Amino acid sequence: MIFIASSHLSLAQSPGRAAGSLPTLGDSSELTASAERRLGDRIAVSIYRDPDYLDDPVLGDYVQSIWQPLMAAARSRGELGTELEERFAWDVMLIRNRTVNAFALPGGYLGVHLGLIGVVSSRDELAAVLGHELSHVTQRHISRLITQQNRQTPWVIGAMILGALAASKNPDAASAAIVGGQAVAVQGQLNFSRDMEREADRVGSGVMADAGFDSRGVTGMFEKLQQASRLNDNGSFPYLRSHPLTTERIADAQARLQLAAGSRGPKGGDADSGKALVLHAMMAARARVLGDPGVDALRAMQAQAQRTSPSGQLAPQDAGALYAGALAAGRLRDLGLARSLASRLQSAVVGNPRAANAADLLALELDLQAGSTPAGAAQLDLANASARADVLLKSRALLAVGRAREVSERLQSWVVAHPKDASAWQLLAQAYGRQNEPLRAIRADAESRAAQLDYTAALDRFKGAQNLMRTSRDNSAAANIEGSIIDTRTRELESLLKEQALQDKLDR
Ligand SMILES: [Zn+2]
């Protein structure tokens, strides 16, 4: 492994800097934020196309409920300046992979394996990892790593990172050879230095505490990693390979914990944290099932849920068992059992609004999976839904019962506020299709491709829409407006592609 000489970095003196300014570090040859973003976009396109990339709105909302407070804390501490915030993507991508890992990519893209969400026992532990990764980004560690590779073009660095990601996906060490033999060496070169890790630990724990999370999340996470390394379980803990657990890291974390004791604690009282643990257990259960654990594991989850009969105060592990069992039964096509487990969960979480909402969405999802009319479809209030998982799942449910107009009305305003939401555009395309509005359907489909940076596919669709306009004899005002939007977007995409091709030439 190649470690970057620490004398170049002078991280220890990294002083409090004015908010809004970029970090000034020892190494002056730093990649600009825009250049780093371009590199990140190039990597992100490949990840969006990867079948293991998962846009699960339920887990996505949960991760965002941890991520957003961390971002806000980094902002108010001056770690995250205005320029970086505007230039970077800040997209936390979920990866369908059972191993425990999280990583920061160039340009503000982050990856979280479902295996990590499935193994942490509280939102504080997840916040510890995310705060650490966020700090790698805000401290511009990635930019400095890339600058170190100054003999490589951005194009090659992008390919190296993708190669390292592909290699880390398969815990089997032999897989590295499949990716061309270079992957292991590459990963070594792209690893952060010890100083960077120390800084990410320090800044990350500050961000996490300011965001209102319990600092014990860090030590809890370390204990898990320690256990895994004792069991020599590196295969399922790739995070350990990129983040070796040194006695120094553990000692530092414990020292910080002692400092924090008494001065800061989690927001809310015990009742609140009990409720948060129930929701967390449900989300961890979801991550374990969506991680494709195999039929035997699904059956075991189903059986465990059947043995679970919560009484009195709901224990998090019981909520998790019921959630996992219901979802697993759904996967095993035992929809009767799935529904009955979900409804037991629904009655068990009464009085815990966020967990109750998650249980309701689970029931809705299972109905949709059964292809049956969702039980409560008549009462579904899409117009007032505001959380992304609510909006997207309720849209799917209403599409299934033929209420496409309500769906397009809600999603139209949703995509105005969230133009990068590819899944929402995709659902909107379906809703227009059902209402026999082919032009709008094609445009929404095109936008969903553009949202995932696939400009070629987007342009194809916009051109298809232009052809359709020419052949249709619709001269209504509405069709003309639609036509001019399509023309404008076609030109925008064309110039984006031209720019990209030019940049690619420079970066090669
Ligand atoms: Zn790190």
Image: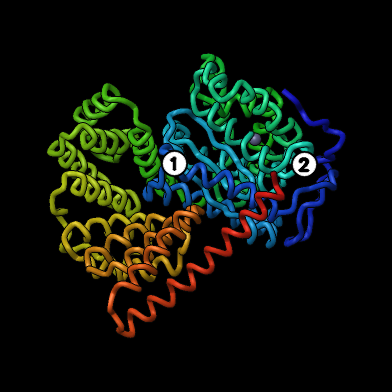
In the picture, the quarter occupied by the N terminus is: top right
**Snapshot quadrant of residue 461:** bottom left
Residue with the mark numbered 2: 147
Residue with the mark numbered 1: 53
The three-letter amino acid code for the residue at tag 1 is Tyr
Q: Position of residue 95 (x, y in %)?
A: 46, 38
| Residue 12 badge | none
Q: Residues within 10 Å of mark 1 (few under 14, many from 20)?
A: some
Left or right of residue 59: residue 238: right
Q: Position of residue 472 (x, y in %)?
A: 29, 74
Position above or below: 92 against 496: above
Residue situated in front as seen by the camera: 466 or 325: 466
Residue at 58%, 40% in the rendered image: 215
Q: Residues within 10 Å of mark 2 (few under 14, many from 20)?
A: some
Left or right of residue 84: residue 337: left
The three-letter amino acid code for the residue at tag 2 is Thr
Q: Which residue sits furthest bottom?
A: 477
Q: Position of residue 350 (x, y in %)?
A: 26, 50
The answer to whether residue 261 is seen in the rendering is no
Q: For the residues marked 2 and 1, what is the alpha-carbon distance in whole angstroms?
A: 28 Å
**For the image shown, how many numbered marks are present on the structure?**
2
Question: Which image quarter has ligand 1?
Answer: top right
Ligand 1 lies under 8 Å from the Cβ of mark 2: no
Considering the numbered disc 1 on the image, is that residue within a helix, a strand or a loop?
A: strand
Residue at 75%, 49% in the rendered image: 31
In the picture, the quarter occupied by the C terminus is: top right
* In contact (CB < 8 Å): disc 2 and disc 1: no
Residue situated in front as seen by the camera: 346 or 59: 59
